Image: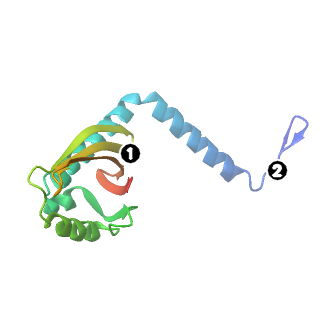
Amino acid sequence: MEMGSVQMPVVGTALPFVNVLVLALTLVFQRSQPGLTRALTARNKALVRDFYTTLLVGRDVDAAPRFLRTDYIQHNPQVPTGLKGFMDTFRERFAQKLPADYKRELLNVIGDNDMVVVYVRQTWTGRDGQHHQALGFDMFRVQDGMIAEHWDAD
């Protein structure tokens, strides 16, 4: 095909062009629908907040299937990937006795579309009588209303 004085090849160019066009239209649509993006982010933040308070603060391991995909990907090497690995690990952890004043708090939740980050604090008094505090974050990817992936600072 010839356009002006530039020779345009016909074979092999349609698919990359279509891919770029689809990507561009997707970005334009997302930008033109900020309410949809805000609503998705709000739903995902609520899901992660509920997960964190139910499972990690409330220590209700049996609630995990409500929040985690069965093929959940775990990037913390101390916790196996998958729903079963998560449940087995936290069932074992939660069976351990904690100091009487142990507290886990969810301090902040931020999100953007499918990514949600929580900022958390744990406090307790050690056997030495000293007060301890640990601050950290967890990052989650949400897919189809379920937590699909997790990273943390461990």
In the picture of the structure, the residue carrying the numbered disc 2 is 9
Give the spatial CA distance, label 1 vs label 2.
39 Å
Tell me if 110 is positioned left or right of 54 in this view: right
Nearer the observer, 76 or 20: 76
- Figure coloring: rainbow
Tell me if 94 is positioned left or right of 8 in this view: left
Q: Quadrant of the N terminus?
A: top right
The 10 Å Cα crowd at callout 1, few under 14, some 14 to 19, many 20 or more, is: many
**The residue under label 1 is which amino acid type?**
Asp
What element does badge 1 sit on?
loop
Picture disc at residue 114: 1
Q: Quadrant of the C terminus?
A: bottom left
Task: Locate residue 102, reporting x and y percent.
Answer: 14, 51
- Examine the image and state in which quarter residue 114 appears: top left
* Residue ID at (23%, 55%): 67
Task: Locate residue 8, reporting x and y percent.
Answer: 83, 45
Q: Is residue 22 above or below residue 75?
A: above
Nearer the observer, 130 or 81: 130
Mark 1 and 2 residues: CB-CB less than 8 Å, in contact?
Answer: no
Task: Locate residue 58, reporting x and y percent.
Answer: 13, 52
